[in-house]
Every structure is written in structure tokens, then in C-alpha cells.
């Protein structure tokens, strides 16, 4: 199909003027490649091709700039899993702490257990809620683990371990972690 232009109002070839103009290159199974979209005096520019499919607009990678998002408009649901999800790891002796998958992890050690870290980014904090009265080891090739404070893991009680990545250099990440026991109490 030849390039089609749909216009409302008086159109100008350069997209200026009091008009709305949308140009399509091809139509195939309700998917259109959009090459230009102009408005009245202010231009909506989409970098590269965009696609429209079943009422949704997909904008080219890296085309949305921070200034295009109004203040206070990013909802909790729009934040990636590393900041919003609880991951129940279950019971075992080998656990994967994928920092991109969740912000809170729960686990029960059924024997001496190793927690292997991956995908951490600098400044990210995760919570590990851990039970099981066995030795615990943190692991990630080339990474450094630093305990903050003097509290050691005590598997006879409930533990909350908070872990922050302070350097996410490839092959040389640095983590700081602190351990606190917890109990149900409504009177802090």
C-alpha cells in the first residue's frame, strides 16, 4: 500500500500549522508503522519508527525522555520487579538471590545453605527473611561481602538480613549486610 496521510484541518507539508497529521507507510494485520505525527504548534516527535497494534502505541527504544513524563505520574505498578516483588524461595540448601527479580526474599534453610547473588545494581537494597538453624554463606564470584554491626545470624529465631549493593562493578561487586532478629510485637 502506498504511503497514506490522514489530516484534520489545514495541513502544511512540514507539519506546522493548525493541523493534525498522521502518516502511515504500511498496514498489515492492524499494525501500522508511524513515520510522523504533528499537532497544533507543538510537535510530538517519535524518534525512529513506532508501531500501533490493537490500540497500543509502541515507541522506539530510548525515545521517551524524562521531561515527557509528568511529575508524580509513575505508579508503584510501573516500577520493575527489583523494587516491588516478594519472592518466596522455599526450603533448601541452595538459593538464588536474583536482585532483578524481587526486593524481598523469604527462605528456610534445611541444611547448611548458600545464597548466590546476581544482577545487583548500586544502591539497591533487598531484604532476606530467613529461618533455619544452619550455617549460611553468601556467594558471588569476585564479590566482597561486608557485615555491618556485630549481630550474627541465629537460626533458632527469625532473622531479617538487609543487603545493599554499594558497588556494582562487573566481577567486583561490593555488598554490605546487616542482620536483625525479629518477633511479633505491636509496641515498639
Image (tube, rainbow, N blue to C red):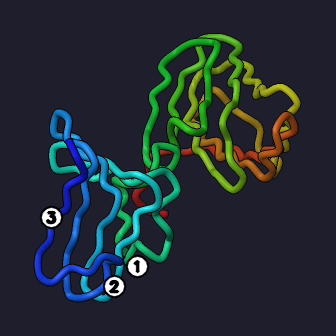
The spot of residue 5 in percent (x, y) is 19, 62
- Taking depth in this image into account, of 128 and 1 the one nearest to the observer is 1
- In space, the residues marked 2 and 3 are separated at their CA atoms by 18 Å
Confirm or deny contact between disc 2 and disc 1 (CB under 8 A).
Answer: no
| Mark 1 crowd level (few <14, some 14–19, many ≥20, 10 Å Cα) | few
Residue shown at the point (69%, 44%) measured from the top left: 179
Mark in the foreground, 2 or 1 = 2
Sooner in the amino-acid sequence: mark 2 or mark 1: 2
- Taking depth in this image into account, of 184 and 44 the one nearest to the observer is 44
Mark in the foreground, 2 or 3 = 3
Q: Which residue is mark 2?
A: 42
- Taking depth in this image into account, of 52 and 56 the one nearest to the observer is 52
The spot of residue 79 in percent (x, y) is 43, 54
Mark in the foreground, 1 or 3 = 3
Q: How many marks?
A: 3
Q: Is residue 164 above or below residue 110?
A: below
- In space, the residues marked 2 and 1 are separated at their CA atoms by 20 Å
Q: Which residue is mark 3?
A: 6
| Mark 3 crowd level (few <14, some 14–19, many ≥20, 10 Å Cα) | few
Amino acid at each position: 500500500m502506498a504511503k497514506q496521510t490522514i489530516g484534520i484541518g489545514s495541513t502544511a507539508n512540514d507539519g506546522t500549522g493548525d493541523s493534525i497529521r498522521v502518516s502511515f507507510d504500511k498496514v498489515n494485520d492492524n499494525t501500522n508503522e508511524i513515520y510522523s505525527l504533528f499537532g497544533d504548534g507543538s510537535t510530538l516527535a517519535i524518534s525512529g519508527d513506532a508501531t500501533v497494534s490493537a490500540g497500543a502505541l509502541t515507541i522506539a527504544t530510548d525515545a521517551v525522555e524524562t521531561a515527557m513524563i509528568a511529575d508524580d505520574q509513575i505508579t508503584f505498578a510501573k516500577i520493575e520487579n527489583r523494587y516491588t516483588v516478594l519472592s518466596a524461595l522455599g526450603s533448601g540448601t541452595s538459593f538464588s538471590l536474583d536482585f532483578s527479580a524481587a526486593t524481598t526474599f523469604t527462605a528456610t534453610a534445611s541444611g547448611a545453605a548458600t545464597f548466590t547473588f546476581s544482577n545487583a545494581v548500586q544502591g539497591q537494597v533487598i531484604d532476606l527473611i530467613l529461618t533455619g538453624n544452619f550455617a549460611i554463606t553468601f556467594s558471588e564470584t569476585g564479590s566482597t561481602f561486608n557485615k555491618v554491626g556485630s549481630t550474627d545470624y541465629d537460626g533458632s529465631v527469625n532473622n531479617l538480613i538487609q543487603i545493599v549493593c554499594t558497588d556494582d562493578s562487573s566481577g567486583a561487586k561490593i555488598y554490605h549486610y546487616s542482620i536483625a532478629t525479629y518477633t511479633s510485637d505491636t509496641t515498639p
